[in-house]
Image: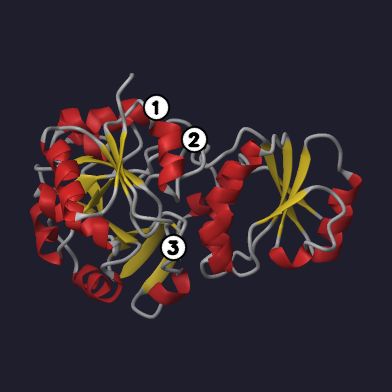
Amino acid sequence: MDISTKLLGTSEEELRYAAGLLARGEIVGMPTETVYGLAADAENPRAVEKIFAAKGRPQDNPLIVHIADIERLEEYAHSIPVIAYRLAEKFWPGPLTMVLPKKEIIPDVTSAGLNTVGIRMPCHEAARSLIRLSGKALAAPSANISGSPSPTEAAHVMADMRGRIPAVVDGGSCPVGVESTVISFEGDAVRILRPGFVSAEELSEWAEVICDRHITEAAAEGEKVLSPGMKYKHYSPKANVTIVDGSEEQYLEFVSRHGGNGVCAMIFGSEADKCMIPYIAYGDTSEEQAANLFAVLRKLDGIGAEQVYARMPSPQGVGLAVYNRLLRAAGFEVVRL
């Protein structure tokens, strides 16, 4: 691939230009509140195939379909339970994806051959404007090379996708910073397939919540999964990442013993004056860690880190999403002190 990639703003003229590309079956980098997505007409198999080619993404990994208005949900899904509408009223537009039985309008390449499709309505104004201007639902996985950290700034998308796609819409930094929460339905209960900013605790106010084992366990080779981010090593910098689970004192003592050339600690912000080896901080609260995580993982490549010891986040609330992403970045390598 060798395409001239334009960096666009969010003016109506520029969004119309991007929508025109989408209407012609091209793919466009699109901002959302979670991460930047690589958008294509979800109904156009050839356009969706361009996403997989640009990312180098396995085709058994389903894509999430983005809509701009709740009224369009029934165009793409059927047998929608009442609880889904209630959750949509509460959390849409926002970082919640619902896996539902798909209609035939969604091609198999978009759903990875499954009879279900994940659908969400982003709350980023530019994303919803682009969806409306295109007149189509947009399939949009994260706009990065498959396996690398997800992009939370337009510059990240340009670094990965320059020469691979015709345009990137720059909508600023993504405030959430981790991909959407993905849920499916089991009767009146919801199963969290991938944790995100909408936490299990929030969802439990509306329904019984089941946390899928793949949140903290790797899927087996050949196993079918309903959500992106459940199966392959993801979000990983070039450095080897190891999660270290222990108290602050235990963690700092561990990294001081394991320092050396190319070794970097990935710490909480409050530990900056206590760490005795080169470090990079990714925040103190779960919300800060979510917003900073992918940018920090990308910075590790920039400083030439070879081995990273990441302080384990709290697996509660939004922290479960941070832990889930770190687990996959680390290939499930955890040292428990």
Q: Which residue occupies the foreground of this view, 183 or 173?
A: 173
The vertical placement of 126 against 28, above or below, is below
Tell me whether circle 2 and circle 1 mark residues in contact (CB < 8 Å).
Answer: yes
Q: Is residue 103 left or right of residue 123?
A: left
Query: Label 2: which residue?
Result: 147
Query: Which amino acid type corresponds to the residue marked 3 in the rendered image?
Result: Pro
Q: Label 2: few (<14), some or many (≥20) within 10 Å?
A: some
Expressed as whole percent of the image width and height from the top left, the position of residue 285 reads 61, 70
Q: Secondary structure at mark 2?
A: loop
Residue 79 quadrant: bottom left
Q: Kindly report which numbered mark, 3 or 1, lies closer to the viewer in this rendering.
A: 3
Residue 118: horizontal and vertical position, in percent? 27, 51
Return the mark for residue 56.
1
Q: Earlier in the sequence, mark 3 or mark 2?
A: 2
Image check: 172 left or right of 232?
left
The residue shown at (26%, 39%) is 28
Mark 2 and mark 1 lie on one chain; the one further toward the N terminus is 1
Q: Secondary structure at mark 1?
A: loop
Quarter of the rendering occupied by the N terminus: top left
Q: Classify residue 268 by image quadrant.
A: bottom right
